[in-house]
Amino acid sequence: MIKKLALIIGFIICLSSCGKDYVYRIEGELSNLEDQTVYAVFEKDNYKVVDTVACTKPGQFQIDQHEAGFHCVTIFFADKEHWVTAYLEPGETVKITGDANSPLLLQVKGGRTNDKLTAFKKKKRRFLESIT
């Protein structure tokens, strides 16, 4: 009985480790993005990783980070004049959408913190539009 239980638990662990080959995924779809290169800066305590990504289609990109432990990523675009920060949770896909000319209004979805910040920005949209 114990051998069967150990075998079942081992099988479940094997299955749960299969699948995704990344820890964090960031997908972007930005309209009006003239420079088709974006820069991602992943941050964790006293350590940063920079990644340069070319858009696959105009304004569309996907970034997979295989290293764990990062708490946020900042995406720089439009010749590094604009940026947006997303907060990372392992296994969560973060989606960044909107107009590259209005970085304060970009929607960042995926993960509790990003969803709450996007909801807040929706409520304050008029104010954010007035300062961009």
Image: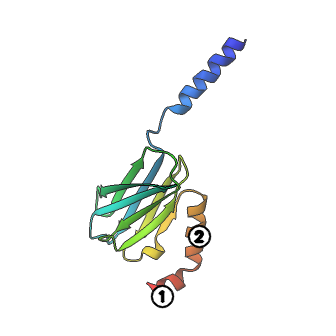
Can residue 123 be seen in this snapshot?
yes
- Mark 2, residue position: 119
Residue 102 screen position, x and y as percent:
41, 77
At label 2, the amino acid type is Ala
Please indicate whether residue 86 sits to the left or right of residue 41 in the image. Answer: right
Going by the picture, which residue comes out furthest to the right? 1
- Where disc 1 sits, the SS reads helix
Residue 54 screen position, x and y as percent:
28, 57
Residue drawn at (59%, 70%), measured in percent from left and top? Answer: 119
What quarter of the picture does the N terminus occupy? top right
Please indicate whether residue 35 sits to the left or right of residue 20 in the image. Answer: left
- Where disc 2 sits, the SS reads helix
Q: Is residue 39 above or below residue 66?
A: below
| Mark 2 surroundings: few (<14), some (14-19) or many (≥20) residues within 10 A | some
User: Could you tell me how far apart the alpha carbons at marks 1 and 2 are, in whole angstroms?
Assistant: 18 Å
Q: Which numbered dot is residue 79?
A: none
Residue 4 screen position, x and y as percent:
67, 14
Q: Is residue 67 above or below residue 119?
A: above
Going by the picture, which residue comes out furthest to the bottom? 130
**Residue nearer the viewer, 77 or 108:** 77
- Mark 1, residue position: 130
